[in-house]
Image (tube, helix red, strand yellow):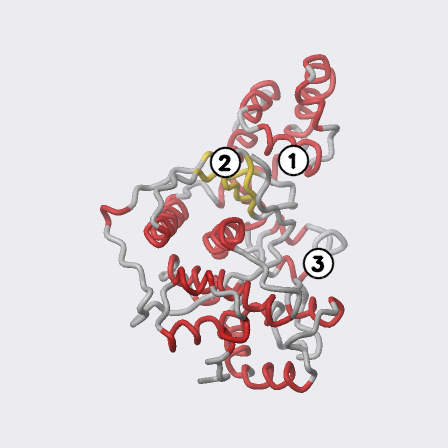
Amino acid sequence: MKTHFYFTIITFLALFVSCENNHNAIELENKDWNQNKAIRLDQVLSKSNDAAFIHEQYTAYPELYENFYSRMLRMGASEDLADKSKVDSLVIPNLNAFINDTSMKLIFKGINEKFSNLEYYENEISKGFARTNQLFGTSKNISIGTFYSNFNATVLENDNVIWIGLDMYLGTDHPIIDMLPITSIPQFYKDKMREKYIVSDVFFGYLMSIIYKPLGDEFLARMLAYGKIAYVMSLILPDENEGNKFRYDDKEINWCKSNEENIWRHIIDNQLLFEKDPSKVDLFFNDAPFTKNFGKDSPSGIGIWLGYQIIADYANKTKQSVKEIIKEENIQKLLSTYEPNK
């Protein structure tokens, strides 16, 4: 299976709407879900001093192993992992030096202490997938796992497993994160390296891989395509904190709500709805300290937030089902009910 999604630091923002009084709300009983236990590859590194054993364990997940060895650690070519002579002469010695490095031992210890118990995340992710199956009438059993990404990946899918890079969620104020040079990870990235985003990050990536469909090259089309993902997320993760789903804190959420009409007016006044120029459009979606033209108090990704507002408004006013909304490709129709701050 090829990689479906891979992010250095999540570039998208997961989004929110309350399911209270929502005609598309999903009722989930305790009997409707089972806990999905995570594969703890991060603990394979932190609890073993045997490089040969680590190699053997990672070999069970070849796509992830190739990513980890050749792209994240940059130790050598992915082909080396399947060459017995190179495994003995290069791979095992490289892994041995890696796991015995003083700095790495400190990082592994930090991850193990922070995430010694994953029950909360396992439960929330399991319930989210149960609601996804209920919503789409499927019975998929999705496997999840955790690993060390060398500060390269939050969530990726390899080997039919959704992997979570726990090092990317150690916490903004964690000593290990504080030691990372801003030349490699800017401060605004560090500010988002919080464990509270794990569940939403998993589902935004998963939904992008199964239902995302570009509606065109225009700014509006891009907003609405992401807005659909956000709306579905609001249904399958009704218990998630609003800010978690945006990768926003309370201040950022409040800024968006207070400035919704100003955002919309700026887009209309500058004729951006059908703009295709990436230099004008990307700044509404890219990770950044803030959204250009809206000041340093604005969060990044407000194009995604606004796309959600439009889709949620359309869903609430038309009472269409989720499947009807996902299938709808007429961007003018999806926009037809929207009024900012109403």
**Disc 3 designates what residue?**
186
Residue 29 on image: x %, y %: 23, 52
Label 1 crowd (10 A; few <14 / some 14-19 / many >=20): some
Residue at 61 percent across and 46 percent down: it is: 6
> The N terminus appears in which quarter of the rendering?
top right
Residue that sits furthest to the top in the current view = 85
- Disc tally is 3
Looking at the picture, does residue 236 appear above or below residue 16? above
Q: Which amino acid does label 1 sit on?
A: Asn
Q: How far apart are marks 1 and 2 (CA)?
A: 14 Å
Residue at disc 1, secondary structure: helix
Looking at the picture, does residue 109 appear above or below residue 196? above
Closer-to-camera residue (47/159): 159
Looking at the picture, does residue 61 appear above or below residue 309? above
Left or right, 289 with respect to 16, comes to: right
**Disc 2 designates what residue?**
160
Label 3 crowd (10 A; few <14 / some 14-19 / many >=20): few
Left or right, 236 with respect to 291, comes to: left
Q: Which amino acid does label 3 sit on?
A: Pro
Query: Of label 1 and label 2, which has the lower sequence position?
Result: 1
**Disc 1 designates what residue?**
67
Residue 228 on image: x %, y %: 49, 64
Residue at 63 percent across and 68 percent down: it is: 300
Indicate which label's residue lies in the foreground, 3 or 2: 2
Residue at 44 percent across and 85 percent down: it is: 342
Residue at disc 3, secondary structure: loop
Residue that sits furthest to the front in the current view = 330
Indicate which label's residue lies in the foreground, 1 or 2: 2
Q: What residue type is labelled 2?
A: Asn
